């Protein structure tokens, strides 16, 4: 089984094109978040001299929510909002005790 087939099975999708579009959305989101981090950290005055734990905390509070929002925005632009909504719900359900399963497809 090749990589594309494994992704299709894991993500519960059928089309090779959908895999390609989803990977493009992840790429666009990552690049945007990377540039946004530099911009936001400059505005907040975050420098490498700050302790790592403080920079990491600020990253979690600012960039992580932005990344998730960007996933939904780019996913919607590329016509994959339903997949990325499901993906984020599945991801965050792992942090909720007693919530081990998420439905395969939710709107």
Image (cartoon, helix red, strand yellow):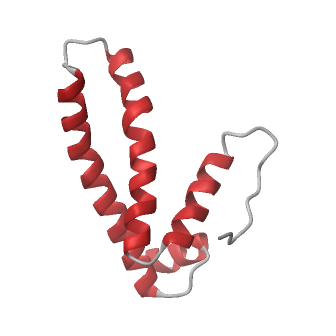
Asked if residue 60 is positioned above or below residue 57 in the image, the reply reads: below
In depth, the one of 99 and 79 nearer the eye is 79
Picture quadrant of residue 70? bottom left
Asked if residue 61 is positioned above or below residue 65 in the image, the reply reads: above
Q: Residue at x 45, y 74 (%)?
A: 3
Picture quadrant of residue 95? top right
Q: Residue at x 63, y 55 (%)?
A: 89
Asked if residue 32 is positioned above or below residue 62 in the image, the reply reads: below
Task: Give x and y (percent) for residue 101.
Answer: 76, 56
Q: Residue at x 32, y 17 (%)?
A: 52
Would residue 97 appear left or right of 55 to someone viewing this image? right
Q: Residue at x 19, y 36 (%)?
A: 38
Which quarter shows the C terminus?
A: bottom right
The reply to whether residue 50 is visible in this rendering is yes
In depth, the one of 53 and 82 nearer the eye is 82
In depth, the one of 62 and 24 nearer the eye is 62
Would residue 63 appear left or right of 46 to someone viewing this image? right
């Amino acid at each position: 089984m090749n990589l594309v087939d494994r992704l299709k099975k894991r993500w519960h999708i059928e089309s090779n094109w959908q895999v390609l579009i989803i990977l493009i959305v992840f790429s666009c989101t990552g690049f945007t978040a990377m540039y946004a981090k530099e911009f936001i950290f400059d505005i907040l005055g975050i420098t490498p001299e700050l302790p790592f734990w403080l920079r990491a905390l600020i990253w979690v509070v600012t960039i992580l929510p932005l990344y998730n929002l960007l996933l939904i925005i780019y996913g919607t632009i590329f016509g994959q909002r339903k997949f990325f909504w499901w993906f984020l719900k599945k991801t965050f359900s792992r942090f909720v005790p007693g919530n081990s399963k998420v439905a395969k497809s939710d709107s």
